[in-house]
Amino acid sequence: MTAEGRLRARPSQPVGAAPAGLQRLELDVGRDGLLYVPAGYRPDHPAPLAVMLHGAGGNAQHGISLLHELADAAGLILLAPESRRQTWDVIMGGYGPDVTYLDRALAQLFARYGVDPARLAVGGFSDGASYALSLGITNGDLFSHVIAFSPGFMAPAARKGAPRLFISHGTRDQVLPIGPCSRRIVPQVERAGYDVLYHEFDGPHTVPAEIAREAVDWLIGREDIRA
């Protein structure tokens, strides 16, 4: 299954109480991951979830930091796994160990926390955005939303479901230039019938605070998020 990029974990009824705050996943002694559960989380109120993927050479803290300042106000759970190598498996040649690890992380999370399946996103920045688009489209029967901050490409193994897509990119990006990247990707996914919210901004290879806030507003369907 992992060779096809497919994730098998699904939201379920959580068992017992689980802590809020920032915590390690403790699924690997080397590269692992982080989970952030907002202070207002209630087991009887399923929360939105964003799986946030770091860029090349990054780590779980980079993934968490993309939306961390907005998580409490939005009631948003954040899961930030780390790639097994310096970047995500499909970028290195094909789906495999990162899909397996993410499936384990999601299964652990779903067993402990209530997650709203209608607000379940995979997202990321740079290589993490490319991987989020690839995994999100491949697993659109799990992910309702995909958040791609400055992606370079996408390589879905299949099309499952119809996740909504949020894509942003800086017009002065010199790492992943907007022309051959988002301005190529966005028309492709629109022609394929996906619901796309696309935002270009005047800036380099980064995620401005206002773009992060817009993505969270879009995910949870609320317009009054404040960092």
Image (cartoon, rainbow, N blue to C red):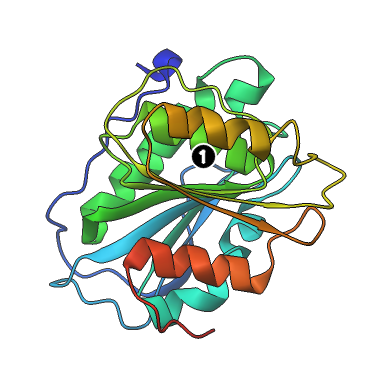
Work out whether 114 lies above or below 128: below
Residue sitting at x 52%, y 24%: 97
Q: Position of residue 226 (x, y in %)?
A: 49, 85
Work out whether 83 lies above or below 213: above
Q: Quadrant of the N terminus?
A: top left
Tell how many labels: 1
Q: Residues within 10 Å of mark 1 (few under 14, many from 20)?
A: many
Quarter residue 181 falls in? top right
Q: Nearer the viewer, residue 32 or 3?
A: 3
Q: Nearer the viewer, residue 168 or 85?
A: 168
Residue sitting at x 84%, y 52%: 172
Residue to which mark 1 is pinned: 132
Q: Which residue is most to the right?
A: 174
Q: Quadrant of the C terminus?
A: bottom right
Residue sitting at x 50%, y 36%: 133
> Relative to residue 147, is residue 11 drawn left or right?
left
Q: Nearer the viewer, residue 152 or 73?
A: 152
Work out whether 116 lies above or below 159: below
> Relative to residue 164, is residue 32 drawn left or right?
right
Residue type highlighted by circle 1: Ala
| SS for dot 1 | helix
Quarter residue 191 falls in? top left
Q: Position of residue 81 (x, y in %)?
A: 52, 47
Q: Position of residue 107 (x, y in %)?
A: 29, 43
